[in-house]
Image (cartoon, grey):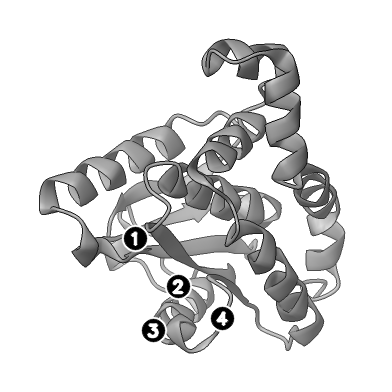
């Protein structure tokens, strides 16, 4: 039986509000960050997909939500008006080549179809699974209310936390006091993000057992 993979297709939001040089620099910086993030085990590393989009494939679908939130935090840290739409397709990959553009399979089709339709939904992170998953989609709507409210400084802190930085490291990284760092963590509602990520594997298992 082929193992399920997670195909992530993401495109920039509001890219026309910024110069081409800015958006290219931000996207390339994000791809470099993701490629070098030790938490992710790649089947295919991130690469520019089309225009202001990128696509990648994770061997472990349980890490897909961490990647989506990390990528959005990294992008929102540049400017409050820039963001990503992230379409996650989880399923089998019948034809996995050395590039996502020439690969095919259930996970690729699910991610691609969702990426084409994600503008119709309010949440900017979507998950497409072989079986219906409306309760999980409803949870993503709640997640959106948090991510959509982050300032650039809160996004920076969330990114640092997802990269396993502690309060001391965050205060040093941004040249702020530890109390200020703790305040930013609290105001970003990190506890809710952390709890969701800790239980995401169980959420996903409800729909991917077969």
Residue at which label 2 appears: 108
Q: Provide the secondary structure element on which disc 4 rests.
A: loop
Q: Earlier in the sequence, mark 3 or mark 2?
A: 2
Distance, label 2 to label 4, CA atoms, is 22 Å
Point 77% across, 38% down: residue: 186
The image quadrant where one finds the C terminus is bottom right
Q: Provide the secondary structure element on which disc 2 rests.
A: helix
* Discs 1/4, front: 4
Q: Count neighbours of disc 1 (C-alpha within 10 A) and say few if under 14, some if 14 to 19, many if 20 or more.
A: many
Point 35% across, 35% down: residue: 32
Q: Which residue is outermost to the left?
A: 20
Q: Earlier in the sequence, mark 1 or mark 2?
A: 1
Q: Is residue 133 left or right of residue 20?
A: right
Point 48% across, 55% down: residue: 57
Q: Provide the secondary structure element on which disc 3 rests.
A: helix
Q: Say if 206 sits above or below 58 in the image.
A: below
Residue at which label 3 appears: 116
Q: Position of residue 148 (x, y in %)?
A: 57, 62
Q: Nearer the viewer, residue 195 or 205?
A: 195
Q: Earlier in the sequence, mark 4 or mark 3?
A: 3
Q: Position of residue 156 (x, y in %)?
A: 53, 35
Q: Is residue 206 left or right of residue 177?
A: right
* Discs 2/4, front: 4
Q: Are marks 1 and 2 in contact (CB under 8 Å)?
A: yes
The image quadrant where one finds the N terminus is bottom right
Residue at which label 4 appears: 122
Residue at which label 1 appears: 100
Q: Count neighbours of disc 2 (C-alpha within 10 A) and say few if under 14, some if 14 to 19, many if 20 or more.
A: many
Residue 156 visible, this angle: yes
Q: Is residue 120 left or right of residue 159?
A: left
């Amino acid at each position: 039986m082929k193992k399920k993979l997670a195909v992530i297709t993401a495109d920039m939001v509001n890219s026309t509000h910024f110069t081409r040089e800015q958006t290219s620099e931000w996207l390339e910086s994000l791809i470099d960050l993701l490629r070098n993030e030790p938490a992710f085990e790649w089947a295919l590393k991130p690469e520019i997909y089309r225009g202001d989009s990128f696509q990648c494939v994770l061997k472990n679908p349980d890490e897909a939500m961490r990647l989506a939130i990390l990528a959005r935090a990294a992008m929102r840290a540049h400017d409050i008006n820039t963001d990503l739409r992230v379409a996650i397709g989880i399923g089998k990959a019948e034809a996995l080549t050395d590039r996502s553009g020439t690969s095919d399979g259930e996970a690729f089709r699910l991610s691609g179809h969702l990426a084409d339709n994600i503008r119709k939904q309010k949440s900017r992170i979507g998950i497409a699974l072989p079986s219906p998953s409306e309760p999980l989609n409803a949870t993503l709507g709640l997640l959106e209310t948090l991510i959509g409210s982050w300032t650039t400084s809160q996004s920076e802190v969330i990114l640092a936390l997802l990269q396993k930085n502690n309060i001391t490291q965050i205060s040093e990284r941004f040249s702020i006091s530890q109390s200020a760092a703790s305040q930013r963590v609290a105001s970003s509602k990190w506890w809710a993000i952390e709890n969701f990520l800790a239980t995401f594997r169980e959420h996903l298992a409800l729909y991917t057992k077969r």
